[in-house]
Image (cartoon, rainbow, N blue to C red):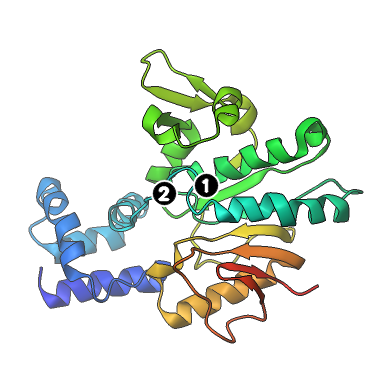
Amino acid sequence: MTNEEFNRIAKFLKSTYGIDMAEKKEIVKGRLDNYIRAGGWSDYTSYMNAVEKDSSGKLEKELVNMLTTNHTYFMREFEHFDFLKQEVLPWLKQKEQRTRDLSIWCGAASSGEEPYMLAMLMKDFFGLEHESWDTTVLATDISTEVLQKAQQGIYKQEQINILPDTWKRRFLNPLPDGMHYQMTPEIKKEVLFRQFNLMDNFPFRRKMHIVFLRNVMIYFDKETKRQLVQKVYNTMHPGAYFFIGRTEALEKGAAPFEMIQPSIFRKPL
């Protein structure tokens, strides 16, 4: 891979998806070399020519799938879910008692663990009242590959061991192979999975009460993050809560959020 070829790929990812790979040539090369050879392209130039001419978008989706890391797990940064249960949901339950309609967006759904965690938490918090509430989780990701896995809702036993026993018994069904479990239809219908590029205009028709956008802004440069955070802010209700990864930070002046604690922010009432 020449520097010119790498720069072309990096520029394409940055302009189309906001993904900043400028310092990651070895990662890009390592993930694409075998794929390029297996696909029969003579070099990266002919490959990128094919990507940009492919009207179906299939090659572009495969490129993004290969270059974005989708690492997540159940109970990741559980402090956020605990804060939701103890602080956010009691307030929202009282505030939205009339409409009984909560808008929840998980903007980096990956293989589904995070949105399913949110759905299970909603079921657990509202209990018998849940049937009278709409707490559907909108779960989006740029990668069609991980979204397909997420929609299946199938996980290995070792992946779910960390979950509370009551959740495992109530929300997961063992599969015949004895090694995998699948989310129950009750939980799967509470999560709406969609492919979405965070660089696009937000199509949401209603404001959000809760936004999880955790561990995804590491891919973006400072200006792209600033623009994204402003778009998130604009799509939220006053008083809504915004959760980012615990190793991430918001730039000062990115949007007028109030910091509740590191990685938890609120749009002022």
| Residue at the image position 63 percent from the left and 64 percent from the top | 242
- Residue behind mark 1: 114
> 255 and 12: which one is in front?
255
Q: Are marks 1 and 2 in contact (CB under 8 Å)?
A: yes
Q: Is residue 264 left or right of residue 50?
A: right
- Disc 1 marks a residue whose amino acid type is Glu
Residue occupying the far top of the picture: 176
> 13 and 234: which one is in front?
234
Q: Is residue 140 left or right of residue 69?
A: right
- Disc 2 marks a residue whose amino acid type is Thr
- Evaluate whether residue 195 shows in this view: no
| Residue at the image position 41 percent from the left and 49 percent from the top | 72
- Evaluate whether residue 225 shows in this view: yes
Q: Position of residue 103 (x, y in %)?
A: 72, 52
| Residue at the image position 22 percent from the left and 63 percent from the top | 48
| Residue at the image position 53 percent from the left and 66 percent from the top | 200
Q: Is residue 60 left or right of residue 18?
A: left
> 224 and 244: which one is in front?
244
Q: Position of residue 152 (x, y in %)?
A: 47, 31
Quadrant that contains the N terminus: bottom left
| Label 2 secondary element | loop
Mark 1 or mark 2: whose residue is earlier in sequence: 2
Q: Is residue 218 above or below residue 151?
A: below
Q: Position of residue 43 (x, y in %)?
A: 10, 62
